Image: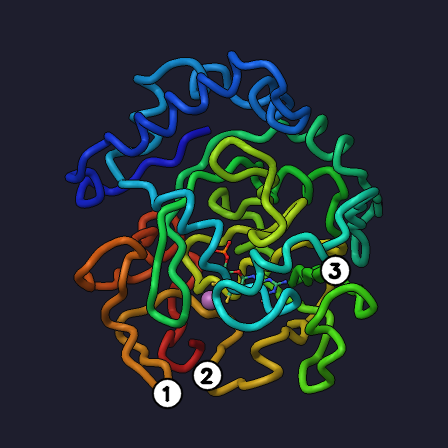
Amino acid sequence: MFVRYPSRHRESAVTPYQAYLNRRQFLRAGAGVGAAVATVAAAGPAAAMGDPEAAREAANGMELTAKSDALSYNNFLELGSGKEAPKENAHLLPTDDWTVTVDGLVNRPMTFGMDDLTKRFPPGEHIHRLRCVEAWSMVLPWQGFPLKALLDLVEPLGKAGFVAFRSIHAPEKLPNQGNGDYPWPYSEGLRLDEARNPLTLLATGLYGESLPPQNGAPVRLVVPWKYGFKSAKSITHITLVEDRPETFWHTVAPEEYGFYANVNPDVDHPRWSQARERRIGDLFKQPTEMFNGYGDEVAHLYAGMDLKKHY
Ligand SMILES: Nc1nc2c(c(=O)[nH]1)N[C@H]1C(S)=C(S)[C@@H](COP(=O)(O)O)O[C@H]1N2
Ligand SMILES: [Mo]
């Protein structure tokens, strides 16, 4: 269940994760724990939740981004532009009675409520780097499950080649969806083999609590080797299609936002270098790694492809 990281990511202290675990234990012991938290704790792998040794292994020494930063420095254009707008407008995101429909080129199209989804696919703990195309990054402890498990259940047809993701569409509620300059709703896409890679997650929690609205409640995509914009938030539809789907940022500015969007220090954004990044909370920039450091797990997906052309 745990993802292992290359040794070069293991050098830093584990203290923040230990603090996180202590808080988590405190939450579980305390009264008044929200139902969603209890569900995650009960459903997740017991070892990770209770056993500090296993949890330390999961963290592999990567320092987690401070929770306060991860929940207040966000990109979620539906809730406003600017990093702090999504948190300020978090209450506007309607998350009650959420359903996720999986359809298109599949044998068994299905619609899930959130309880159904997390019962069928118990979330596990996955700590990943997130690298925004804007050259900042975080390390975030998600609770989620591999998208592959869901795809296996609905049985993609042989001619399915891509997976299209659609975020919430509620122009009457979301401040920015009245803005006709954008191709709402937010959409993203992956090649089917990318979607089936074990690193590709559907996340329902963050820092051991149900996903905050500003981070994409109640369920979002996490694709850790790609720029953050691929990780669509607040997903309502997952549709298997034959050809590469239209996607939000690629439609807005194709020369700036490629469909593949693999993190790549050698392919600059037209307006800035991608060679380095600022980890939120750090003073100094650090080098950006090919595939965001996940090359061992994903480089084979792009064998023979010119990644400068297919950026
Ligand atoms: N629906 C939707 N999903 C989205 C976005 C968005 O504006 N709308 N922004 C993306 C971008 S650019 C990034 S970097 C990540 C940020 O995730 P975080 O705020 O949880 O760190 O969400 C991505 N998913
Ligand atoms: Mo981003």
Q: Position of residue 43 (x, y in %)?
A: 60, 21
Q: N-terminal of the two: label 2 or label 3?
A: 3
Kindly state the secondary structure of the residue where label 1 is placed. Answer: loop
Q: Residues within 10 Å of mark 2 (few under 14, many from 20)?
A: some
**The image quarter in which residue 242 lies:** bottom right
Q: Amino acid at mark 3?
A: Ile
Q: Position of residue 264 (x, y in %)?
A: 32, 69
Relative horizontal placement of residue 298, taking residue 78 as reference (left or right): left
**CA–CA distance between discs 2 and 3?**
24 Å
Q: Residues within 10 Å of mark 3 (few under 14, many from 20)?
A: many
| Location of residue 121 with respect to 33 vertically, above or below | below
Provide the residue designation for mark 3.
168
**CA–CA distance between discs 3 and 1?**
30 Å
Q: Position of residue 21 (x, y in %)?
A: 38, 24
**Picture disc at residue 141:** none
Kindly state the secondary structure of the residue where label 3 is placed. Answer: loop
Q: N-terminal of the two: label 2 or label 1?
A: 2
**The image quarter in which residue 292 lies:** bottom left
Name the residue at 73% across, 70% down: 185
Q: Is mark 3 within 8 Å of ligand 1?
A: yes
**CA–CA distance between discs 2 and 1?**
6 Å
Name the residue at 56% across, 65% down: 85
Provide the residue designation for mark 1.
270
Q: Position of residue 285 (x, y in %)?
A: 20, 64
